Amino acid sequence: MQAPKVFVTRRWPSEVEAELAARYAVTLNESDRPLSADELMAALRDYDAVLPTVTDPLPASVLGVTPRRCRILGNFGVGYNHIDIDAARQAGIVVTNTPGVLTDCTADIAMLLLLMSAHRASEGERLVRTQAWTGWGPTQLLGNKVSGKTLGLVGFGRIAQAVARRAHHGFGMRILFFTPSDPDPAIVQTLQATRCASLEELLAASHFVSLHCPGGVATRHLIDARRLRLMRPDAHLINTARGDVVDSEALITALRERWIAGAGLDVYENEPNLHPDFLELENISLLPHLGSASAETRNAMGRKVLENIEAFFTGREPPDRVV
Ligand code: DGY
């Protein structure tokens, strides 16, 4: 029997590329540049499995290509808001993702941004790098203390809980959270966390707000001008979820007019073409979507995709099936 044909849309760590190539007839995107809609349609037309990632928008217009050979999208990543899930379901395409393996890494990046924003680390590094630093001063670059402060988590899934563990047990922070689903009471108890009845209540009470909800239509601009206005003037907003959860224009105004003290972003609307005004602001720390960017994690993500397509092609239920 011929090995299934598999198309990988971006370069992966070499270890997992080699494992893939040992099992399947694999085509890699050697150039590693994000593919166009036409290129993605060609892949769906010619391959049994396409392994996309967050940089590959797959709307109904792309998924609806005919004829189509592809029967499974093994997404390299936990978030799948770049895939039109209803269109995939209707077309009978199985979609899988990679939950769990990037929880710690993403939580680490959320804490990194929280600390960077609180302590004005990006401003400080710019000062040093531009050789404008004239030496220590008692009032220089004063930030906000983190230990003992209140952290509000929007969403309370795996990554939010991992952030809560770091913040509560490591920094003695008080944890608030807002989520539509019902969390495990034992976890809430361990973290001594308090559930807020509304997002508004959480925003008003938190020194740090960290976003951990999925992207997509339901959460687009969840954090808008009205909600930013509810935050404390010494508060910091951290986003490692998806860029479109925050209205960029509103956040820029909030930072410029000091409705809030600072922000730390790892994700952006219209990524990687972030709003140019972000670059003009001092009180923001900007990272290039590093949430899962450790060698260990990217390898683990690749292995998860392998497990999922292996299950699919041997007639078993893929462990991380989304649809
Ligand atoms: C994900 O997995 O959704 C991240 O954003 C990319 O690693």
Image: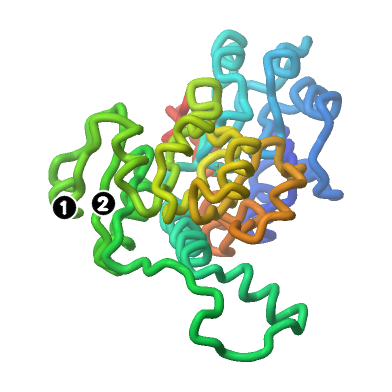
Nearest the eye: 307 or 120: 120
Q: Secondary structure at mark 2?
A: strand
Asked whether residue 25 is in view, the answer is no
Relative to 293, does residue 147 appear above or below in the rendering?
below
Give the labeled residue for mark 2. Answer: 175
Residue drawn at point x = 73 percent, y = 42 percent: 275
Q: Which numbered circle lies on residue 322? A: none
Residue drawn at point x = 66 percent, y = 30 percent: 49
- Asked if ligand 1 lies within 8 A of label 2, the reply is no
Nearest the eye: 250 or 274: 250
Nearest the eye: 305 or 298: 298
Relative to 285, does residue 205 appear above or below in the rendering?
above
Task: Give how far across and how far down residue 301 sits, in percent.
Answer: 54, 50
Pointer 1 with pointer 2, Cβ within 8 A: yes
Farthest residue in the bottom direction?
135
Quarter that holds the N terminus: top right
Residue drawn at point x = 63 percent, y = 69 percent: 123
How far apart marks 1 and 2 lie (CA) works out to 7 Å
Residue drawn at point x = 52 percent, y = 31 percent: 224
Relative to 239, does residue 87 appear above or below in the rendering?
above
Give the labeled residue for mark 1. Answer: 192
Q: Is residue 176 left or right of residue 256?
A: left
Task: Give how far across and how far down residue 171 sits, in percent.
Answer: 30, 68
Q: Secondary structure at mark 1?
A: loop
Q: Amino acid at mark 2?
A: Ile
Task: Give how far across and how far down residue 50 sits, in percent.
Answer: 68, 32
The disc, 1 or 2, on the residue closer to the chain's N-terminal end is: 2
